[in-house]
Every structure is written in C-alpha cells, then in structure tokens.
Amino acid sequence: MTATQYSLAELMICAAATAFDNDGEVLATGIGVIPRLAASISMSTNNPDLMMTDSEAYLLSEPNPIGARGDDFVQRNETWMGFSRIFDNVWSRKRHAMIGPTQIDKYGQSNISALGGDYDKPKIQMLGVRGLPGNSISHANSFFVPSHSKRVFVEQECDVVCSIGYNPARLPKGYQLSDVDIRLVITDICVMDWQGPEHQLRLVSVHPGVSVQEVIEKTGFEIHVEANTPTTPAPTAEQLALIAKLDPHNIRAKQLKDNPPGVRPEES
C-alpha cells in the first residue's frame, strides 16, 4: 500500500534503499542519516543478507535505530566485527558504501577534500581524501546528494579527484573501466546511475513534481535521458512504519532544509 503523505527525506531513504537490494551478503556502510536508514530499510525488507555494523565492533542481526536508545534496548549482536575485519571486507569487494561527495564530475569522480585555488592552498579545506581512493577502487559506491546543483555536479573535473571514476586517463595501472563500480546517485530531485552510453550519467527517475528539464539545468554536464522518464515511487505504508521504528526521534526531519514534503507543491 502506497502512502499518501511523506517527506522528501523519507522518499529519498526509500529510493536509496534500492541501491542495496540486490547486493546479497555484503557490508553496507551508509554515511549520514539518510544513507544509513536506507541501508537499514533494505536489510529489513528486500535484502536480509545485507550486513550492517553498530559502527563500533559488532555485526548486527538487525539494524540499530539511530539516536538515543532506552536502557532496556538490547542490541542484536551477531558476531564481532572489529576494524581489521572491516578491511577484509573492503579489499575483497564485499562492501557497498553510500557517501556524500561535495563535487561529482561527468566521469563519476568525486571530491571530499578541498575546493578552489591551488592544490597546496585551496580556498576551502574539507576532510582530505581519507580512505576514499582505496574504497572506490576496492568496492561498490553510491552517492547521496541533499541539494542537487551545478556546484555539486561540476562542469569540469573535480577540484581534487578523491575517487576512481570512468575516466580512462586516470585509471590505476592494471584497471579497466569495467572494474569501476559506481551504483546509484540519489539527490533531492531525482535518482540517477552511470548506465548511460559509455558510462554516462543517466537519469533513472524524477521525484514527484520535478521535471526532467530541471534536472538537466541543475547538472553541470550532459546527462543521458531516455524517453518517458518515470517518477520515483512513493514510499509504502510498511516502509514508513519501518523508518519510524528505525528513527524514533525523527532525526531525518533535520537532514533537508525545512523538511519539505515528498510531493512538491504546485506553484500558484
């Protein structure tokens, strides 16, 4: 049963959950509230083989709710999953992470490090590349973008290339384009993937009330658009109930500015 009222955050959680549905037994890492809830929804419904940790040291039989928990909460530990075992999953390609890059270019390369200026003296310093180069080479990644714009989907190559993409000029020695595994891109206006011609970014669906033209205008490079682009499916009542259980403090409502509805109101 499809719900009639839902927030944009809830729509994005359910859309992002589909990224993990066909993964089987891999470690899901959702970085941020919406990606984490998305992985939890997938594990609780379409992919019970999906593995999730408590972000500390245990692999869980069912996902933990986010936020503060009561004293009577019992975590469903399945086995120990210390940091060394995380790396075993990373190097063996048994992991799928959903990350939130600051920039994404037409190759699917992403930037979490720095913006503008020279590399040695950027205008804005962020996280640094951290583990993203090795992670992007070793396992599947998806992208979460809370505000779709040309500042994120940049016209030129990323200011700092932190992850592998479908750029033949930057492939590591011994790698082929077929080794790159970038899955879904979930934004506040659409769902996309890299299944267009020659790994071009492709529009998969637009969120309710969003036009294809708006997506094109807010993307800094050409994307592949097929005929009759569908609308992103609304969350089901069952999915919304699960989200409420996994996020009892409604932290999701603070992830997007003004917590907009899932169906964009018509302009008067």
Image (cartoon, helix red, strand yellow):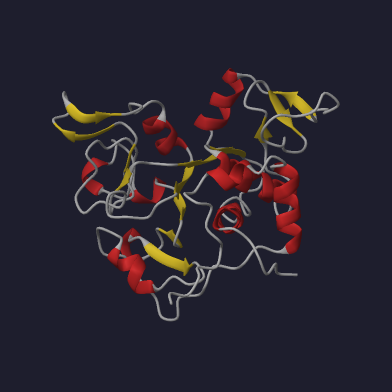
The spot of residue 232 in percent (x, y) is 54, 67
On the rendered structure, is 88 left or right of 257? right
Residue positioned 60% across, 52% down in the render: 17
Q: Position of residue 205 (x, y in %)?
A: 48, 68
Q: Seen from this angle, which residue lies furthest left?
A: 118
The front one of 49 and 2 is 2
Where 72 falls versus 50 (above or below)? above
Quarter of the N terminus within the rendering: bottom right
- Note whether 202 is above or below 81 in the view shown: below
Look at the image and tell me whether residue 120 can be seen.
yes
- 83 up-or-down from 209: above or below: above
Q: Residue furthest right?
A: 72
Q: Is residue 252 above or below residue 29?
A: below
Quarter of the figure with the C terminus = bottom left
Can the viewer see residue 224 in this picture?
no
- Residue at 44 percent of width and 48 percent of height: 181
Horizontal placement of 240 versus 163: left or right?
right
Question: What x and y, as percent, mark residue 165?
Answer: 33, 46
Toward the bottom, the furthest residue is: 228
Q: Nearer the viewer, residue 59 or 238?
A: 238
Query: Which of 19/24 is in front?
Result: 19
Q: Horizontal and vertical percent for residue 180?
A: 39, 46
Front residue of this view, candidates 199 and 242: 242
Res 63 quadrant in image = top right
Give the left or right position of residue 59, taking residue 122 as reference.
right
Quadrant of the rendered image containing residue 245: top right
Residue 169 falls left or right of residue 9: left
At a point 34% along the width and 28% down the height, the residue shown is 129
